[in-house]
Image (tube, rainbow, N blue to C red):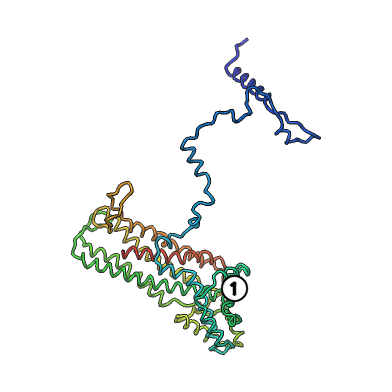
Amino acid sequence: RQPPTSITLLRLACLIIALNLFQCLPQVHSTNQQNNIDSIENETTSCPSLSTDVDDQPKKKMSNADKFLEAIAEFPDDALTDNRTYEHPLVERYATKEMSFVWSPAMKFSTWRKLWTALATAEQELGLDISDEQLEQMRSKLFDIDFALAAEKEKEFRHDVMGHVHAFGTQAPAAMPVIHLGATSCYVGDNTDLVQIRDALKLVKRKLVKVLATLKEFAMKHKDLPTLGFTHYQPAQLTTVGKRSTLWMQDLLMDLERVEHEIETLPMRGVKGTTGTQASFLELFDGDHEKVKALNQRVCELMGFKKAISVSGQTYTRKIEFFILSVLSGIAQSAYKMCGDIRLLANLKQVEEPFAKTQIGSSAMAYKRNPMRSERVCSLARYVMGLPDGAANTHANQWFERTLDDSAIRRIILPEAFLATDVILNLLEN
C-alpha cells in the first residue's frame, strides 16, 4: 500500500473538524412538518469546545481608528441644524446683492403683480369694466406679498400662478375678478423672465464699462513699459505691457457692443393668449382686433419695453435665450483669455495680482503668490461658456406652441449665467 499523501491527510482533518462542529449545532425540531423557529431560541447545547456566554469572552480594546470610524458612522439628528440645507455658492459666496436681487423671489413675484396691474390698467383704458377702486387695491399690494399664503394656495391648486393669483386676490378682494383677466400663465412667467433678463443685462453693461475704464487706465500707465512678446508661447518681438492689455480691452469692447444690442432689441412677450392667437382677448373685446393690438402695445409701454415679439406660441421663442447666453459666454471667453494670460505671466514674475498683508498664499507654502482671482475667473468662465448648449437644446426641443420641458432647466441656467458673469466682472475690475 502507498502511504497517505498530504492531500489525503488534509481532507481527513477537514472531515473530522466538520463532524465536531455538526455535533455542536442546536437541533431544530418540527411540528406538523413545519419548522418551529421559536424552538431554536430555546434550544441549548452542551458542546464543551464552544462557550455561549459572551461576557466570558475577553473584550478587545478599541483603537483610536476604530473609535473614529464609530464616531463618523452616522450624522447626529440634532447636530448643525441651522446648516443642513445646500447653499448656492454663486449667491452665498460670490455674487453681488444687486444681481442676486434681480433673480430673487421678491423681484419675480412683485413683477407678476406689476404685470397683472398693467394688464388691468390697459384693459380699463380700452373700455373694459374695471373700476378705479380695483386698480387702487392692486397698486397698494404690489410689494406686500404673503408668500406663506401663496405657497398654501399653490399646494391646494398644484399651480404656482393660480396660487399667487388667489394670494393677490385675498389681499385685494375687490380686484379678484379682474386679476389675470384674459391671460395665461406665460403672460406673467415669460414676461417676468424678460424683465429680469433686461435688468440683468443693464447691470452687466454697467460692470463691463467699469472693467474697460480700469483697463484703459492700466494701459495708459504702462503704454511705454517694454515686455517680451510671445507667439506659440515662445519668445518673440518686444511689445509693451499697455499694448498687450489693449488686446483684452478689444475683446471686452466687442462684448459690450453685443450687450447693448441685446438690451436695445430685446422684446417683451406681451399679451398673446394661450397659443399666441390672442383669442381670449379678442373675446373680451368682442372681436375688435385693433383694441387687442392696442392692449398689447400699451402693456409693453407700461412695463418699459419698446415692442413685443411679433409672433409667439404660448411662450416666446427660446432662441432669444440662446442669443443672451451666447453674449454672456462671449464675456466669459474674453475674461478667460485675459486671466489665462495673467496666470502665465505670474509664473514668469512679470505680472502679479494684488496681495494683502494678511493674505496666505498656501497653507503649506505661505510664500507663494498664487493668481487666485484669475483662477477663479477661469473656473467660473468655463461654466458660463458651457451654458449656451443647454439653451440651444431647449429651443430645439420646443414642440409646436410649447412644451413644459423648458421650465426646470431655464430656472437654473438663466439666473446662474448672469450670477456667474456678475462675479467674473467683479473679479476683473478688482
Q: Residue furthest front?
A: 55
Amino acid bearing label 1: Met
Return the residue found at the far bottom: 127
What residue is shown at x 34% (from left), y 69% (from top)?
Answer: 208
Residue nearest the observer in this picture, 130 or 371: 130
Residue drawn 49% across and 39% down? Answer: 67
User: For the point 27% across and 49% down, which residue is it?
Assistant: 367
312 or 116: which is nearer to us?
Answer: 116
Q: Is residue 80 above or below residue 100?
A: above
Total of numbered circles in the picture?
Answer: 1
Where disc 1 sits, the SS reads: helix
**Which quarter of the rendered picture does the C terminus lie within?**
bottom left
Circle 1 residue:
162
Answer whether residue 378 is visible to the viewer in this image: yes
Farthest residue in the top direction? 1
Q: Is residue 77 above or below residue 216?
A: above
- Rendered location of residue 427, percent (x, y): 34, 63
